[in-house]
Amino acid sequence: MHDAYQATVVPAIQAAGRDVNAELLAGTLPLVGIVVGGFSTGQYVPELWHILIPYHQNPGSAQMRVARGENTVTWYSMYEPIVRYINGYDQLIIDELKTYIEGPGLLGRPLAPNEQAAIGDILQKYQYVMSFSSMPIEQGVEYVRFLVDLAIKHYHFSSGFAHEPWTEKIVGGRVRLGVVTYKGESFRILD
């Protein structure tokens, strides 16, 4: 993957008159992100790794995002529609409302920890609760497909966010999901 990046992306950056080495040091190069999740040999609890090309080109340089035993859900890329679906809001809305509430027009002071906790409790009541750990594999695959389709369809029909119109129609393409279980079978791509 790194070789393909070097052969396609780097020449395009250079053709645009940009300094690849300076952008590499500044962290402003376009990235190719790969998320690898699953079970290491002899393990019965999964882990999740994140690889950013061109930064993680050396063996052992990937970042562990979810360690074995952590029971969590992690989203990548253009996941805002998924977060809004599950939570009923996204963090940008919460941040803007907090700034408004704390501003001179209302409180004129930062929210106290107990006030923030009370707001968090209210918001949490409206989140959808998913029992990932007890889902049969078929239902888990169906749920993942639903969320991927949700994001794709959102960006297909959306004009983007009002504050970020560039988000229009940037997610899509052919979706293929894969699965592997504890039964000693090999990873397989689903139809």
Image: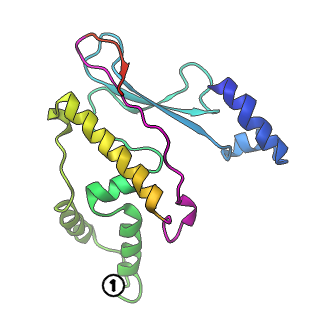
Residue beneath the point at 40% across and 53% down = 153
For the residue pair 127 and 97, the one nearer the viewer reads as 127
For the residue pair 58 and 11, the one nearer the viewer reads as 11
Left or right of 55 in this view: 171 = left
Q: Could you tell me how many numbered marks the image carries?
A: 1
Q: Where is residue 60 shown, x and y percent of the image? A: 53, 20
Residue beneath the point at 82% across and 48% down = 16
Q: Where is residue 150 shown, x and y percent of the image? A: 35, 51
Quadrant location of residue 164? bottom right
Left or right of 83 in this view: 12 = right
| Mark 1 neighbour class, 10 Å CA radius: few under 14, some 14 to 19, many 20 or more | few
**Quadrant occupied by the N terminus:** top right
Is residue 102 shown above or below 64?
Answer: below
Magenta segment: 159-183
Residue beneath the point at 70% across and 46% down = 26
| Dominant SS in magenta | loop
Residue beneath the point at 82% across and 41% down = 14
Is residue 162 shown above or below 64?
Answer: below
How does the figure colour the protein chain or chains? rainbow
Residue 79, visible in the rendered structure:
no
